Image (cartoon, rainbow, N blue to C red):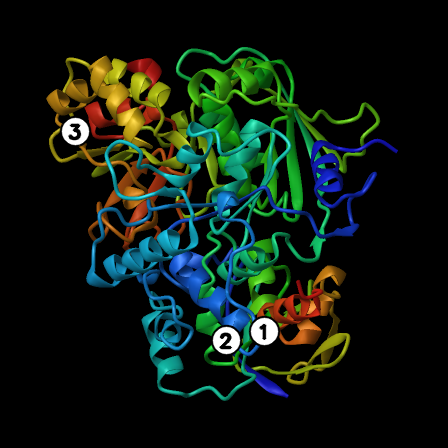
């Protein structure tokens, strides 16, 4: 029987001629990514070697990437000390794919990995971050693990006892209407699948809409696949994948892409037509509580956030800047913008987007995860409401359990910043 | 036999179990103080040592969804509670097995706070209501790690079994 993309990737990585959903494999890892939680990985890694008489050495420093993004610059002495410990570890172990707190090469881990060509089609990518599903956008199998699992991978070079996931085929057709795009598609799909509808499964994306979609859009949909419970989302590598890695990441090596077999087995097929899709909103407090913007238009918002690994790329900023140019953020509403990387920040400066945001009254912050997970900055007050292009709206997510978070596209966020209420961008 | 100390609904996220603002705290000796810290009363009872080891947290579907933060597991492990849920999100389940946090999958479970449950090899018996519910076996791939007592001892054994050279 034929194989899905992930079955093919896992078979190759495990040194097997083939594999199938449900089999147990031990795939070699091509890239192992961590952020500030590397502090915990280091502890667990050292613990593994206690009493073994072996020196604690990582299996291959060239395959480990560490990117500071969750709390940059550090918000507390504790975080700064964790970052210092990680910095020392990377130096001592020869880990060169290390992105410190910098304006040139810094940024959010899920942006840095594609941007620097660390991810390639067919790779097995593991990360101590649930949004490691992002890297399926480049035709890789990316999945999140905990810190102890990462410590095990650092020492062995492979992931132990991985059950090959079954795959759901998602076929997307149609042309997006104006002001509707990849974020609306994935929110709509999560609403259809529910927050656990893809638990322990892979979402494999197909269809003319996906083929035409930029890598940036593919990143948004693979990033949020985990919000339907998916182990990973994946767009089989194609011409666009190769174009992105050549033109934007400067990769010169061969880039063989992995396609599924024609007779691959899928546990389910879901078809989506985007030609009549409205802008979508995920309402508090679950990502699968999805409604068309018309159902919640008029809801007052005190904070607008544009950015994150989901929607902080140049095309996202362009959409928002086009809407905000010459307009003002409404009184009583504050707007925070977080470009996903230093490189994107520089490009947005050159294009004039940063000036557009600042003139409109938005605050442009340094690249990083920002308020997305409520650890650092942009916390909400009691009974306040945020509208955000980020990926989660769980109770307390933005640092305050007495607040609410709605999720949307950059276009909806920008239009709503002008009015101070949730607004359909087609009406401004 | 052990008592249900908290009954939760579906889709309990790791932000609920261990809020993001405490993520800079990583040591398993320090994380338990922040378990369910946005549920202040329950957090206080945990910290007061009110619940004996083996006490049961009942979850609905998709328990532990969201972030991969392992603190959500180490914080619960600190109190040696047992999680019995209808289903458990992938990374949380994996982290639990890796850290030795006891988790039981029981899709049809009916149990309320204060009920006494007995967890057998393949069932969860609610002694208060007299009803028994089937367990779902853990993913087979994880049994070896559970048998070794967690992923650290399991990995240690693999490293020690490697030919020297």
Q: Residues within 10 Å of mark 1 (few under 14, many from 20)?
A: many
User: Dots 1 and 2: beta carbons under 8 Å?
Assistant: yes
Q: CA distance from mark 3 to mark 2?
A: 43 Å
Write down the quadrant of residue A39 in the picture.
bottom left
Residue drawn where x is 67% and y is 75% of the image: B148
| Image height of A193 relative to A74, above or below | above
Residue A300 visible to an observer of this rendering = no
| Image height of B152 relative to A394, above or below | below
Q: Nearer the viewer, mark 3 or mark 2?
A: 2
Image mark for residue A294: none
Q: Which of the two residues, A303 or A322, is positioned nearer the viewer here?
A: A322
Percent x, y of residue A344: 31, 25
Q: Nearer the viewer, mark 1 or mark 3?
A: 1
Report the residue marked by disc 1.
B100
Q: CA distance from mark 1 to mark 2?
A: 8 Å
User: Dots 3 and 2: beta carbons under 8 Å?
Assistant: no
Report the residue marked by disc 2.
B77
Q: Residues within 10 Å of mark 3 (few under 14, many from 20)?
A: many
Mark 1: secondary structure: loop
Report the chain holding disc 3.
A
Image mark for residue A362: 3
| Image height of A127 relative to A138, above or below | below
| Image height of B74 relative to B44, above or below | above
Residue lying farthest to the right in this orientation: A1
Q: Is residue A100 left or right of residue B49?
A: left
Percent x, y of residue A268: 74, 35
Quadrant showing the N terminus of chain A:
top right
């Amino acid at each position: 029987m034929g194989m899905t993309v992930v079955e093919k990737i896992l078979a190759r990585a495990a040194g097997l001629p083939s594999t199938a959903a449900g089999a147990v494999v031990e795939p070699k890892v091509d890239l192992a990514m961590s952020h500030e939680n590397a502090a915990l990985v280091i502890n667990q890694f050292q613990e593994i070697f206690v009493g073994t008489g072996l020196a604690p050495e990582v299996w291959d420093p060239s395959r480990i990437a560490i990117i500071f993004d969750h709390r940059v610059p550090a918000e507390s002495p504790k975080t700064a000390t964790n970052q210092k410990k990680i910095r020392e570890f990377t130096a001592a172990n020869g880990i060169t794919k290390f992105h410190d707190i910098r304006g040139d090469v810094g940024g959010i881990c899920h942006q840095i990995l594609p941007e620097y060509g660390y991810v390639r089609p067919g790779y097995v990518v593991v990360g101590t971050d649930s949004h490691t599903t992002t890297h399926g956008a480049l035709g890789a199998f990316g999945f999140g693990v905990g810190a102890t699992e990462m410590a095990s991978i650092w020492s062995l070079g492979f992931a132990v006892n991985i059950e090959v996931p079954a795959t759901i085929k998602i076929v997307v057709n149609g042309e997006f209407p104006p002001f509707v795009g990849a974020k609306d598609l994935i929110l709509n799909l999560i609403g259809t699948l529910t927050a656990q509808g893809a638990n322990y499964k892979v979402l494999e994306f197909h269809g003319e809409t996906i083929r035409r979609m930029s890598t940036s859009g593919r990143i948004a949909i693979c990033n949020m696949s985990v919000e339907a419970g998916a182990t990973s989302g994946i767009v089989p590598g194609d011409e666009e994948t190769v174009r992105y890695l050549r033109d934007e990441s400067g990769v010169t090596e061969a880039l063989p892409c992995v396609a599924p077999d024609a007779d691959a087995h899928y546990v389910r097929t879901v078809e989506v037509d985007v030609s009549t899709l409205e802008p979508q909103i995920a309402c508090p407090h679950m990502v699968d509580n999805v409604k068309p913007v018309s159902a919640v238009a008029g809801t007052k918002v005190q904070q607008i956030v544009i950015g994150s690994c989901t929607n902080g790329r140049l095309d996202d900023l362009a959409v928002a800047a086009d809407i905000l140019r010459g307009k003002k953020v409404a009184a009583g509403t504050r707007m925070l913008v977080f470009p996903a990387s230093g490189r994107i920040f520089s490009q947005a400066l050159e294009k004039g987007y940063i000036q557009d945001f600042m003139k409109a009254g938005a605050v442009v912050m340094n690249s990083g995860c920002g308020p997305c997970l409520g650890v650092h900055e942009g916390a909400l007050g009691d009974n306040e409401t945020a509208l955000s292009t980020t990926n989660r709206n769980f109770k307390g997510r933005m640092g305050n359990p007495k607040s609410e978070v709605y999720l949307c596209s950059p276009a909806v966020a920008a239009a709503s910043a002008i009015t101070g209420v949730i607004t359909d961008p087609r009406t401004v | 036999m052990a008592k249900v100390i908290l009954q939760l609904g579906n889709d309990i996220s790791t932000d609920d179990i261990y809020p993001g603002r405490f993520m800079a705290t990583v040591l398993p000796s320090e994380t338990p103080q922040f378990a369910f810290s946005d549920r202040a009363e329950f957090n206080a009872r945990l910290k007061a040592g009110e619940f004996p080891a083996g006490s049961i947290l009942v979850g609905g579907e998709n328990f532990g969804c969201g972030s991969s933060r392992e603190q959500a597991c180490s914080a619960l492990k600190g109190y040696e509670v047992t999680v019995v849920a209808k289903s458990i999100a992938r990374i949380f389940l994996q982290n639990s097995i890796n850290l030795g946090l006891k988790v039981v999958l029981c899709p049809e479970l009916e149990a309320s706070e204060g009920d006494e449950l007995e967890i057998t090899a393949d069932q969860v018996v609610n002694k208060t209501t007299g009803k028994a519910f089937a367990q779902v076996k853990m993913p087979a791939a994880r049994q070896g790690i559970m048998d070794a007592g967690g992923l650290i001892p399991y990995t240690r054994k693999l490293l020690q079994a490697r030919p020297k050279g």
